[in-house]
Image (cartoon, helix red, strand yellow):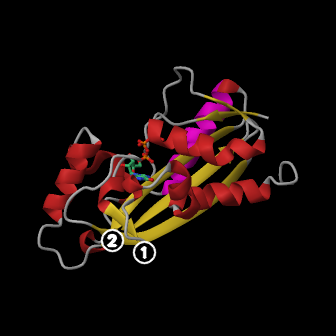
Amino acid sequence: MRVVVATGNAGKVREIAEALGGLGWQLEGLGGLPLPEETGTTYEENAALKACAAAVTRGLPALADDSGLEVSALNGQPGVYSARFGNRASDTERNLYLLEKLRGAADRRARFVSVVILAYPDGHLETYRGELTGTLLEGPRGDNGFGYDPLFVPDGETRTLAEMTVAEKRAISHRGRALAALIEAHRNGPPA
Ligand code: ITT
């Protein structure tokens, strides 16, 4: 099956391609197609906006991920607004902004959430969700991954997500869990 991966985030593309390798799908990029503005207030709404736009325009099934980091000491922020946190333009600047917001905070707990939606041109949607809890360090560690990975140590681990390989991150991560549910649902062909 040909599937459009509807994301402009190279880190997500890498993780999605690695995770879905075994399905035998032919993954395609956006091919210059702009993604719609993320006007939703939930991961589900934003993932559906992105996946549906790509599916309708390309006439192919399209997969989108909407995700974010929910920080306990910030009452769950930035959440769905994680990509725009503090209006900072780069991952590095957003990480510094987050560290500044958390300076002196005793509670460093946080949770990643990923909602993956596979949309079909006829409007049918499949929705998968995954979460990962952990703690935020006081400084970045590691060069792999993207976004807030260098600050985030998953529960039960000593390394940050940025110190793991793509496969190691996939085995435990929010996105890895959502994609594992998709793979399970498609094990015997497309779900009814
Ligand atoms: P697309 O909409 O084009 O897919 P995006 O980066 O704008 O890319 P989102 O709107 O879903 O995607 O924003 C998610 C943000 O949350 C992302 O930019 C990171 O800052 C953060 N994030 C999500 N998953 C992450 C992960 O696995 N590791 C680190 N940070 C992550």
Q: Where is residue 87 shown, x and y percent of the image? A: 22, 44
Q: What element carries label 1?
A: loop
Q: Callout 1, which amino acid?
A: Asp
The residue that label 2 is drawn on is 135
Q: Residue 62's quadrant in the figure?
A: top right
For the N terminus, which image quadrant? Answer: top right
Q: Position of residue 71 (x, y in %)?
A: 31, 68
Q: In this view, does 61 lie to the left or right of 151?
A: right
Marks 2/1: CA–CA distance: 7 Å
Q: Which residue is label 1 attached to?
A: 155
Q: Residue at x 44, y 55 (%)?
A: 164
Query: Which secondary structure is most common in the magenta stretch?
Result: helix
Q: Is residue 36 above or below residue 33?
A: below
Give the residues drawn in magenta, as a range. 43-57
Crowding at mark 2 (Cα within 10 Å: few <14, some 14-19, many 20+): some
Q: What element carries label 2?
A: strand
Q: How many labels does the image show?
A: 2
